[in-house]
Amino acid sequence: LTHPPLSSSLSHSSTMISANLLDLNAPAIRISMIEEINNMKTTWKAAVPIRFQNATIAEVKKQLGTIMPGEENYYAPEEEKTLFKTETTAIPDSFDARDAWPQCASVVGRVRDQSNCGSCWAFGSTEAFNDRYCIKTGDASHVFSPYDTLGCCSGISCGFSMGCNGGQPSGAWKYFVNHGVPTGGDWADVGTGSTCKPYAMKSCAHHVDPVPAGMVSCTEVETYKTPSCTATCDESAYGTAYSKDLYKASSSYSVKGVSNMQKELMEQGTLSVAFSVYEDFESYSSGIYQHVTGKYLGGHAIKMIGWGEEGGVPYWTCVNSWNDSWGEKGTFRILRGSDECGIEGSVVAGTV
């Protein structure tokens, strides 16, 4: 990938105009767009995704679920972190939290699955908190529950989060400070009694063709509703009471600017970030993503774990919540340094 970066994303005002022009009943994926992207020979490749093969744009939008800066009801953290130990000159050309803290690689590199629910915000926040807990304590055995965050972090006190209808990592981090979150594995862990609140929504193949053996396409899975908030564990065999299984954060804050994001990632661990999703991202297959065509669909929250450079093109490395059959084994890379799709403008973190 030696192509230079293309022009940056659309401005916020033009983004919202594009959103208003969307035909929600139109097909989400167009072969013409796939061909257009690949013919550009830019820094990434597009492919026909089975996840939205027959879906409408309205159905795609349901998979997103966070509010971007400048949009109505956006909730910014009350504090911004500005002091760091690392000097700018000490920031390396590349960094990967999986390598920096190998004892936590299984946690940091764990790719999860939000299924058919707009719960990206719960995953992008809970996973980063989980990583930071492991980095501080060395405990890689406890997996935190996005399912609890999804069901219990709601309303004004949680950044206007609305479960499967979307939410904000900033609200979730506030929830971790004020309430705490219990353990909770994935769909495969339901019924095993290994965690308090595993994710009780069926894993499915997102954006990939053919569907991997042993999995089903998300087109065959129901669109889930927000789970009820309970103060008890869903797994009776777990053996630990919900109130005794809560893990709390000490603080939450925003981080602004590329170098500060790098310093924070190096010093404390992974970040909860959000970015604007356009139609072309739905066809991402590999490479360093940058928006090149298509209208705005909505905000999406994910976890940022590092950065690097390939062919002269700087990038961030992020973990998505569409399972490891999607993208680059569940991760993707996105252009770094130009606030591509707002990826550097909505960053939340906290201390354990």
Image (tube, rainbow, N blue to C red):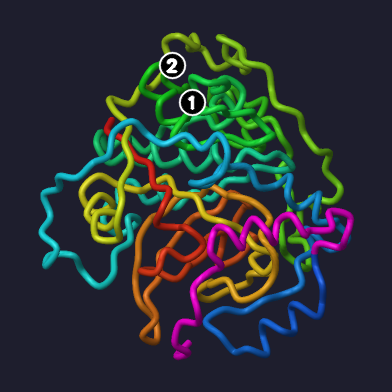
- Work out whether 264 lies above or below 233: below
Q: Residues within 10 Å of mark 2 (few under 14, many from 20)?
A: some
Spatial distance from mark 1 to mark 2, Cα to Cα? 7 Å
Where is residue 198 drawn, in percent x and y?
Answer: 60, 29
Q: Residues within 10 Å of mark 1 (few under 14, many from 20)?
A: many
Type of residue at label 1? Answer: Thr
Q: Nearer the viewer, residue 173 or 341?
A: 341
Q: Main secondary structure of the magenta part?
A: loop
> Helix, strand, or loop for circle 1?
loop
- Residue that appears at 51% across and 12% down: 239
Query: Where in the figure is residue 40, as x and y percent of width and height?
Result: 63, 89
Relative height, residue 314 to residue 253 (above, below): below
Is residue 19 on the magenta stretch? yes
Disc number for residue 162: none
Residue name at image x 27 percent, y 39 percent = 80
Amino acid on which disc 2 is placed: Asp
Residue at mark 1: 183
Q: In the rendered structure, are the residues bearing label 1 and label 2 in contact, judged by CB atoms less than 8 Å apart? A: yes
Which residue has dot 2 on it? 245
For image coordinates 73% across by 49% down, the residue present is 61
Tell me the residue at 24%/36% (across/down): 136
The kind of secondary structure element at disc 2 is: loop
Instruction: Give, as a single range, the part of the protein colored magenta.
Output: 1-28
The answer to whether 35 appears left or right of 156 in the picture is: right
Which percent across, then down, holds residue 189?
62, 33
Horizontal and vertical percent for residue 314? 37, 75
Residue 318 in the magenta stretch? The answer is no
Question: 68 or 126, which is in the foreground?
Answer: 68
On screen, residue 159 above or below 258: above
- For this view, does 214 lie left or right of residue 288? right
Upstream in sequence: badge 1 or badge 2: 1
Q: How many marks?
A: 2
